[in-house]
Image: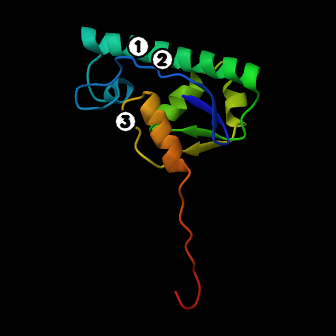
C-alpha cells in the first residue's frame, strides 16, 4: 500500500500474510469449489480476514492524517474487490470513492514492487484515431 502525492511518497506499508495457495490462487476464490476443513485452508482464511481488517485500519488512518485521496488504485482481482468493500465499516461510503484498476501485474508486495508499479503507472501511450490511421 502506498499513499502518493504526485511523485512524493507520503506513507507506505507492505502487508504480507499467508493467504495464497501453492499455485498462486487466493483462498477465498478456492472455496467456491473445494472443502474448508483442512488446517491450511482455515489458516489462510483467518489470515485473509486479518489482512482485510489491517488494510481497512491503515486506510482509515491515512485518510484521517493525510486527507481523502483523489483516486484509489487497486491491484487485486475484481472478485476480491467486492470482499474488500464488504469488509469495510461503511460499504455505502466505499461506493462513493473513485477507484481504478492497476493495469499491471503486482508481484510479491514489498517496497520495491510498490515503487515499480508506481513508476509503470506514470507511463502512457497516445494513439491517434482518424481517417488516415
Between 52 and 38, the one nearer to me in the picture: 52
Q: Which mark sits nearer the N-terminus, 2 or 3?
A: 2
Determine the secondary structure under disc 2. Answer: helix
Between 52 and 32, the one nearer to me in the picture: 52
Q: CA distance from mark 3 to mark 1?
A: 19 Å
Residue 112 vertical position relative to residue 16 in the rendered view, above or below? below
Q: CA distance from mark 1 to mark 2?
A: 6 Å
Q: Which mark sits nearer the N-terminus, 3 or 1?
A: 1
Task: Please state which of the two labelled residues, at mark 3 or mark 1, is closer to the viewer.
Answer: 3
Between 101 and 115, the one nearer to me in the picture: 115
Residue 54: x and y in percent read 54, 15
- Disc ID at residue 130: none
Q: CA distance from mark 2 to mark 3?
A: 17 Å
Residue 102 vertical position relative to residue 34 in the rendered view, above or below? below
Q: Residue at x 53, y 42 (%)?
A: 118
Residue 106 appears anywhere in the view: yes
Q: Which residue has dot 3 on it?
A: 107
Report how many numbered discs are placed on residues in the image: 3
- Asked if labels 2 and 1 touch by Cβ distance under 8 angstroms, the answer is yes
Residue 78 appears anywhere in the view: no
- Disc ID at residue 51: 2
Q: Residue at x 71, y 35 (%)?
A: 69
Residue 80: x and y in percent read 47, 32
Apparent side of residue 117 relative to residue 59 in the rendered image (left or right) = left
Q: Which residue has dot 1 on it?
A: 47
Residue 103 vertical position relative to residue 87 in the rendered view, above or below? below
- In the orientation shown, which residue stands out farthest toward the front? 8
Amino acid at each position: 500500500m502506498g499513499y502518493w502525492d504526485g511523485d512524493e511518497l507520503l506513507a507506505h506499508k507492505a502487508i504480507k500474510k499467508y493467504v495464497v495457495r501453492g499455485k498462486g490462487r487466493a483462498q477465498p476464490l478456492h472455496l467456491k469449489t473445494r472443502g474448508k476443513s483442512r488446517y491450511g485452508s482455515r489458516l489462510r482464511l483467518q489470515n485473509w480476514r486479518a489482512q482485510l481488517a489491517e488494510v481497512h485500519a491503515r486506510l482509515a488512518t491515512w485518510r484521517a492524517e493525510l486527507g481523502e485521496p483523489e483516486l484509489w488504485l487497486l491491484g487485486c482481482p475484481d472478485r476480491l474487490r467486492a470482499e474488500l468493500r464488504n469488509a469495510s465499516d461503511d460499504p455505502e461510503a466505499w461506493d462513493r470513492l473513485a477507484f481504478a484498476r492497476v493495469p499491471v501485474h503486482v508481484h510479491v508486495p514489498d517496497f520495491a514492487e510498490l515503487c515499480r508499479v508506481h513508476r509503470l503507472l506514470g507511463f502512457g501511450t497516445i494513439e491517434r484515431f482518424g481517417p488516415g490511421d
